[in-house]
Amino acid sequence: MREPNHVHPATPGAPARWLTVAPERTVLGVIHNVTSAIRLLDLLTVFDGDLRVQTVFTCTGSSPFADGVAEFAAARELPFLPWDEAVKAEFDLAVGTSRGGALHRISAPLMGAPHGAGYNKRLSSREPGAGSREPGAGSREPGAGSREPGAFGLTAEWLVYDGELIPSAIVLSHQEQLARLRVGCPEALPVAHVVGDPCMDRLRASLPFRAEYRAALGVRPDQHLLVISSTWGRGSLLGAAGDLVLRALAELPHDSFRVLAAVHPNAWYGHGGWQLRSWLRPHLDAGLLLPQPADDTWQAALCAADAFVGDHGSVTLYAAGLGLPGLLGAFDEDSVAAGSPMAALGEALPRVSPALPLAAQLERAARDQPTDPRLAAVTSQITSHPGQAPARMRRLCYHMLDLDEPAAPLAPRPVDVPRDLPSAPRPPVERPLFVEALVTAGDGDDATTGPHPPLEPAGPTEVLIRRHPAHARATATPRPPLTDAHLSVTAGEPDARWAQAADVVTARTSASGPHLATLTDELFAAHPGCALVAVEQEDGRCLLRTRNGASFHGCWESPPAWATTSLTASAVYAWLLRHGESLAGEVLVRLTPDGVPARLRVRRLGTHPAPHSAS
């Protein structure tokens, strides 16, 4: 801990003997909140490897979302100065990624850059919580603080103080922003520089590593990853349509889809990470991935994703820029700057419909959006210099520092592979699942599971399995009906409504020999609605027993990763409903219609005395 009045060794003017390396220039990184800090660190990588440049950081203290900044800085070991100390020192360059706070007090040429995908937000400094410098001070824009403020960061309201331009350089990502700057603050045009979008460059440079990101996120090659992104505020997806997260988990088959929520740092730190996890606990139990927003995981997730559902936040624009098919779960027109790429994106992307299955809407987006000229026009406005933002940014920074730029070329750096991804709480029992099983007989006759008479197939039976978390399915609205679904639970399920109604029960432990019959009897007694129990055996095979006493062995040929005991039981249960208990043979099991089938061999063992009915 630093003592009061203690001077940081890296502060300009501190005794030179305190430092091990003697830098020639000192840069001040200006943090507004965690959102701005994340982008700031991306920009400051232009100084990597240069011992001539020392960077220190401060926080304006003007954001209502300041929680998390101290932890962010400590976790990354940032050399940090209190704001009052930072404004007393003189620096060679200051870099900020937000316009909030008393930036005019900084004694250094200030470079201002966006902390999102360009300048798309409409925000007045007179709004509560906007993080303004001083309400109304120095505002020269006609109608500042009115109902029609310009784009945040492109108007005099944010760029001028007491008649003087605050930044010495304004970083733009696309040429189109020059026209809006010309309207909002024409005196800033001489210091505007179109360098491109470094985040978009990193995302595109990361696409070749899609497989690595998917593996790190726990997404199998045969699964689809849906990213649901939410910015902050009442009009965001979480604020206005938070039930979409639960709907996705309930509707999309559990085995073929993973769902990841990318939550804006302001929403995360505004409510608190604990609170968000508490609110989303049922979703986490249903398999939701919820990474913390203070790292690169959301970027890796976009590169790993197959589709997205978003709102008016930057993640939506970046996702569309990568060519991902997507839908809008919410879109707050009042927060979006007129004439911005985000406003155009809001017109081009379809809204989620409550009347159609979500999977069908995503399929339509994947089919139609790659050739949509409106989307192509929008995404072309993310950057004017694809792949060049790091090099152009470095050139500008070294020019402002009056230093020779390093000779080595600078290319976009791919996003790091996520590690230590927070895992959802893991209960001791698997979540209850509703299971749809479409059974196709070998003779080509199709039928869904149900009380059909036994049929003799001409070839292997095929079963298409779709499983859905029961808790999410029971809560979500709307929810399209399932086709002849059965309920599968694990022994010990604490919720009586699922335990009593289960059709299939899987034991938590393996058993063999005389203990096997005892265990299956106990399972039938504890689950009066159960028709089939499954017990994994020590040799890896699965013993399955019906309430009528018929027993079977199930064994996978080259078992895939998803071939769990509970899925084995559901496949056999569907097979028995289709063909009856006298049949044995092979079952080809799929999780998606076009997926590679896995072969399950089922052998009948005989009939044992039926268990006693529960009293």
Image (cartoon, rainbow, N blue to C red):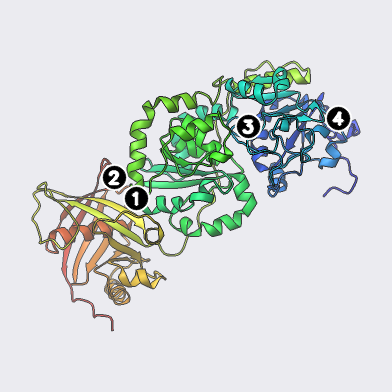
Circles 4 and 3, Cβ within 8 Å, touching? The answer is no
Circles 2 and 1, Cβ within 8 Å, touching? The answer is yes
| Disc ID at residue 90 | 4
Disc number lying in front (4 or 3): 3
Given residues 605 and 78, the one toward you in this image is: 78
| Mark closest to the chain's N terminus, 1 or 3 | 3
Q: Measure how far apart labels 2 and 1 are at the Cα level.
A: 9 Å
Q: Which residue is mark 3?
A: 151
Q: Measure how far apart labels 4 and 2 are at the Cα level.
A: 62 Å
Q: Is residue 539 above or below residue 143?
A: below
Q: Measure how far apart labels 2 and 3 are at the Cα level.
A: 45 Å
Q: Measure how far apart labels 1 and 3 are at the Cα level.
A: 41 Å
| Disc ID at residue 186 | none
Q: Position of residue 203 (x, y in %)?
A: 52, 30
Density class for disc 2 (Cα within 10 Å; few <14, some 14-19, many ≥20) is: some
Determine the secondary structure under disc 4.
Answer: loop
Given residues 294 and 589, the one toward you in this image is: 294
The quadrant holding residue 220 is top left
- Report the side of 254 relative to 204 (left or right): left
Q: Which residue is mark 2?
A: 592
Disc number lying in front (2 or 3): 3
Tell me which amino acid carries mark 3. Ala
Q: Measure how far apart labels 4 and 3 are at the Cα level.
A: 30 Å
| Disc ID at residue 253 | 1
